[in-house]
């Protein structure tokens, strides 16, 4: 019976929900993100200990590929990555350090995933 209670708390999202959440969360375009990933500042993120099972810059590469696809072209692997982004970014955003974040590793990490905290988020 206990395992049924655990299952009842699991939230299952549809592909449309995942896609919508991902697109609302990512506020950098594919070209902008690609340019960022090749900057010398983005390489500083590689020097930080990994917080997830996927390095930030590799996550950014996957995000670029998703942003360049049409909705109907997305694969299960793409949706898996979108779910990873949806799970990671909000938690990382909440860890905002005090002071100026312009040149912070915190901001650089978020940008490598496709979210720039200095930009206004897309209107919903």
Image: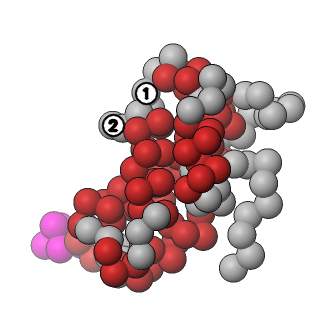
Q: Residue furthest top?
A: 47
Number of numbered callouts drawn: 2
Residue 82 coordinates in the image, percent (x, y):
41, 61
Residue that appears at 65% across and 25% down: 41
Q: Is residue 100 above or below residue 32?
A: above
The tag on residue 53 is 2
Residue that appears at 64% across and 50% down: 32
Mark 1 to mark 2 CA distance (whole Å) = 7 Å
Residue that appears at 62% across and 30% down: 39
Q: Which residues are magenta?
A: 1-6
55 and 61: which one is in front? 61
The tag on residue 50 is 1
Q: Quadrant of the N terminus?
A: bottom left
For the question of whether residue 32 can be seen, the reply is yes
38 and 123: which one is in front? 38
Q: Is residue 45 left or right of residue 98?
A: left
Residue 80 coordinates in the image, percent (x, y):
30, 60
Neighbourhood count class around disc 1 (C-alpha, 10 Å): few under 14, some 14–19, many 20 upward: few
């Amino acid at each position: 019976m206990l395992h049924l209670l655990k299952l009842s708390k699991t939230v299952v999202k549809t592909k449309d929900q995942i896609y919508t959440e991902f697109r609302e969360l990512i506020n950098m375009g594919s070209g902008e993100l690609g340019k960022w990933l090749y900057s010398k500042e983005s390489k500083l993120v590689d020097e930080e200990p990994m917080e997830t099972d996927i390095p930030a810059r590799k996550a950014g590469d996957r995000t670029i590929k998703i942003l360049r696809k049409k909705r109907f072209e997305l694969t299960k692997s793409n949706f898996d990555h979108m779910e990873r982004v949806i799970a990671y970014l909000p938690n990382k955003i909440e860890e905002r350090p005090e002071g100026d974040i312009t040149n912070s590793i915190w901001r650089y990490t978020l940008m490598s995933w496709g979210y720039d905290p200095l930009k206004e988020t897309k209107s919903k």
